[in-house]
Image: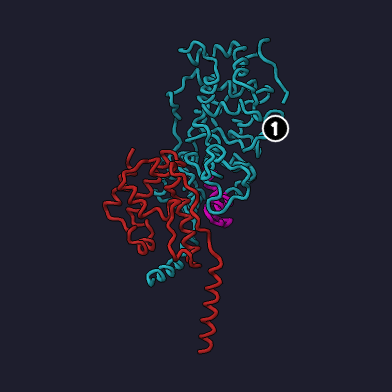
Chain colours: A red, B cyan
Amino acid sequence: MRRKGILAIVVIVLAAGLQLYQPERKNPPSNPAASFEAVARPAPELADVLRRACYDCHSNETKWPWYSRVSPVSWLIARDVQRGRAHLNFSEWNRLSPQAAQQKLVEACEEVRAGQMPLALYRWFHPEARLAATEVDRICAASKAP
Amino acid sequence: MRRALIAMVLWMLALGTDCGRKPSAAVDPAMLKVFEPLPEVVVASYGSPSEELIALGRMLYYDPRLSKSQQISCNTCHDLNKYGVDNEPVSDGHKGQKGDRNSPTVYNAAAQFAQFWDGRAADVEEQAKGPVLNPVEMAMPSDKLVIAVLRSIPEYVDAFRRAFPKEKDPVNIDNMARAIGAFERGLLTPARWDKFLKGDAHALTFEEKAGLNAFLDVGCQVCHSGALLGGNMFQKLGLMKPYPDQSDPGRYGITKNEADRMVFKVPLLRNVEKTAPYFHNGKVATLEQAVQEMADYQLGRTLSRKETEAIIAFLKSLTGEIPLDYIKQPELPKSTPRTPKPDLSD
């Protein structure tokens, strides 16, 4: 019993210590004129879907949840966001040539169509990010636009 | 709250799922959609260039009289026999002055969406004027001197008239750039990679295909995609980890927008095996180091030696053939007594 108590204290101290190490959660500076919405001028319905389901990881407008401040989960979320932005960033759409932009939308369509994106864990945690078939169709239609 | 705690645990369990894949030579065709074969022609906004325009551009490309010292031509830093580069970290310009950035290859460059490391020129025609007038490169003090040189050489005047038959006074700086750009649009180097993309599964070796899979697994194609494996977007250098050399702010220097700090055009990877040293500052001497640093700074991945070697094997399949007939240096027209003399002053 005493051993269990010591173990619990050690775990609590370690967990508390971990909180001292936090990743950077700052959203990078954004130029509204550089965004997908400014450059590609999508229909408001499409912009809304993307904002709801994709922007936390694929834009510079991440809404960081409370648990993103708890180590070690904070590190994993920060890593996912960083990787997400590296792959596709709707806040930096003006960095892409028209062909590259189209290709990114094609990939986005394939990912959401296959249910790979948003990530299952994220969907579970963010019910608003679960895409209806019509919303998937909307993203895919955008990927086919000239 | 309970849901959040379970999610936290699951998130942690998800860690590490992308590790430990073994190389394979079976390439998933769906993964190749981000690439395209090299185009046969790179069309200009004005249409297809005439043979006369290309011939004029070829002469101008090789002519050192477009520089103040009359010692430096386009080919000095973008040597067409060396895959369009000089293999120096930064090039020597007028009176040995060093440039700020590594001279990128001119091969296949016309098919990029923008020119220069910071993308400040939209196409090769706009780009061609830059180095001629840059004080540390070819250092011509003004358009006027460039035009004075060209007008002093009757063969050039005739060549401009043939290239621009509808214009009364065709010898001007814009037409010079258009001619050089026209020539550069033909500097294409199709490779075995293109045959592979067009369906010849045997065009790449086992090692190269395994290397392609490593390239895709690591995520290099996120930026190095399209017909050139690059040259179709800007990206921040140091996406996952700050790049140590912050002395060149990249595109920020043009836009003055904080979001563009350390943002550069993604360089194309065709012939990358031949175009060392690497990066905008030319500070990376080997392809091995370049691949490892890119994975580290851009993707947050530490590559094993095997992964690095595999990716390099694939990159070597992008080396194309230099179009020897197309780049054959023409005899340059002779200067006349009216031609301004070389100027070796600062």
* Magenta stretch bounds: B291-317
Residue B269 visible from this viewpoint: no
Which residue does the numbered mark 1 point to in the structure image? B97
Please indicate whether residue A114 sits to the left or right of residue A1 in the image: left
Name the residue at 55% across, 44% down: B261
- Give the residue displayed 50% in from the left and 67% down from the top: A71
Q: Residue at x 53, y 61 (%)?
A: A23
Please state which amino acid type lies under the numbered disc 1: Gln
Residue B153 drawn at (x, y percent): 61, 12
Which chain is mark 1 on?
B
Q: B218 and A124: which one is in front?
A: A124
What residue is drawn where x is 48% and y is 15%? B164
Q: Is residue B298 magenta?
A: yes
Residue A65 at x, y percent in the picture: 43, 62
Q: Nearer the viewer, residue B107 or B165?
A: B165
Relative to B121, say whether A18 is above or below. below
